[in-house]
Image: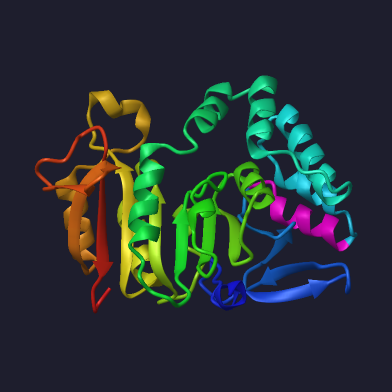
């Protein structure tokens, strides 16, 4: 159940437990507080970020006045005005009028309105891409446990992977974009799901030994401090918990614009240093025989994947 996960929430800035605080009784408004601050929850999304504009405090002020749509608009800081209007209208249609647009229709409208057309075009064309199929195969199809399985998805985007999880699993999606988490929340298909808008390079917002699996799907290349995120991953995973990366690339001229590449050898060393074991590499796609296993010296430089499990001392 999600409530078990929320009991494990931890502030990434002061590393103390987050406690739920309810205000405007009967209206469903609440926040999470720690020793250093208070963070709002908007339409079920935990806004766990700090910036120079004190956005989280402004959101809280609106919520405590009962102004949920104003709070939602404020959370969309940095989003183009046209996209703000479209996503606000979409939420109004669903939660006030009971009308829900299909996700593909919303993406088409966002694409037509612009800006960032290349990004929305990518989302429209790649909702069932090879890397998503690979992540599903590794993280879902190979899970044999009949008990609740806790998965955290770092860089969850607009929720394509969340659509694949089993109904008994508990899913947490992290993303620094509130627009992305808002779309994901709008189309979520399971109750055991929590979306958090958070800057993951500040730390993963959970206490230790919580998750069975952590996934980086098409996202690890964009992490600057990779060693820190691997340390954080080891911390929040249970013993023998699975660490999965899908679509990592090596650093070379062909991948210059794709984020911060890392060689398979360097990544292997970082994982081993943080007490991960059973580190295996494979390609970015799945065929009729399953995963295409490779060695760390023969990975495809333009895109490779791996999985590992947390050791005793991780």
Viewer can see residue 218:
no
Give the residue furthest to the front.
288
State the residue at coordinates (59%, 63%). Answer: 193
Dividing the picture into quadrants, the one containing residue 269 is bottom left
Position in image of residue 5 (x %, y %) = 55, 73
The residue at the point 64 percent across, 32 percent down is 107
- Where residue 201 appears, as percent x and y from the top left, is 45, 53
> Which quadrant of the view contains residue 286?
top left
Q: Residue at x 74, y 57 (%)?
A: 42
The coloring applied to the image is rainbow
For the residue pair 206 and 92, the one nearer the viewer reads as: 92
Asked which quadrant contains residue 30, the reply is bottom right
Q: What secondary structure is the stretch in magenta mostly built from?
A: helix
Look at the image and give the residue range highlighted in magenta: 52-64
* Vertical relation: 67 (above or below) 116: below
Residue 55 within the magenta-colored segment of the rendering: yes
Q: Is residue 287 among what the camera can see? A: yes
Q: Nearer the viewer, residue 201 or 240?
A: 240
Q: What count of labels does the image hold? A: 0
Q: Is residue 41 above or below residue 275?
A: above
32 or 237: which is nearer to us? 237
The N terminus appears in which quarter of the rendering?
bottom right
Coordinates of residue 233 in the picture (x, y in percent) = 37, 64
Q: Is residue 14 above or below residue 253?
A: below
Asked if the stretch drawn in magenta spans residue 33, the answer is no
């Amino acid at each position: 159940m999600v409530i078990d996960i929320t009991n494990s929430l931890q502030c990434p800035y002061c590393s103390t437990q987050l406690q739920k605080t309810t205000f405007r009784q009967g209206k469903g408004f609440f926040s999470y507080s720690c020793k250093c601050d208070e963070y709002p929850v908007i339409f079920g999304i935990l806004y766990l970020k700090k910036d120079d504009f004190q956005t989280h405090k402004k959101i809280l002020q609106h919520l405590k006045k009962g102004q949920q749509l104003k709070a939602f608009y404020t959370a969309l800081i940095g989003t183009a005005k046209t996209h703000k209007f479209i996503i606000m209208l979409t939420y109004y249609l669903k939660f006030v009028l009971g009308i829900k647009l299909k996700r593909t229709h919303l993406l088409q409208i966002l694409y037509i309105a612009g800006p960032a057309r290349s990004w929305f075009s990518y989302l429209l064309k790649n909702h069932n891409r090879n890397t998503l199929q690979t992540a599903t195969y590794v993280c879902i199809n190979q899970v044999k446990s009949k008990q609740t399985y806790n998965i955290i998805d770092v860089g969850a985007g607009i929720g394509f992977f969340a659509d694949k999880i089993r109904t008994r699993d508990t899913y947490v999606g992290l993303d620094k974009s509130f627009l992305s988490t808002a779309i994901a929340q709008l189309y979520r298909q399971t109750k055991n799901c929590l979306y958090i808008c958070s800057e993951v390079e500040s730390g993963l917002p959970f206490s230790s030994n919580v998750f069975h699996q952590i996934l980086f799907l098409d996202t690890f290349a964009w992490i600057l401090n990779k060693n820190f995120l691997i340390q954080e991953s080891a911390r929040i995973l249970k013993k023998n918990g699975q660490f999965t990366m899908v679509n990592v690339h090596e650093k070379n001229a062909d991948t210059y614009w794709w984020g911060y590449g890392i060689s398979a050898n360097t990544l292997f060393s970082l994982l081993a240093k943080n007490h991960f074991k059973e580190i295996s590499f494979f390609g970015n796609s799945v065929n009729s025989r399953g995963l295409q296993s490779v060695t760390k010296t023969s990975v495809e430089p333009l895109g490779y994947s791996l999985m590992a499990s947390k050791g005793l001392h991780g």
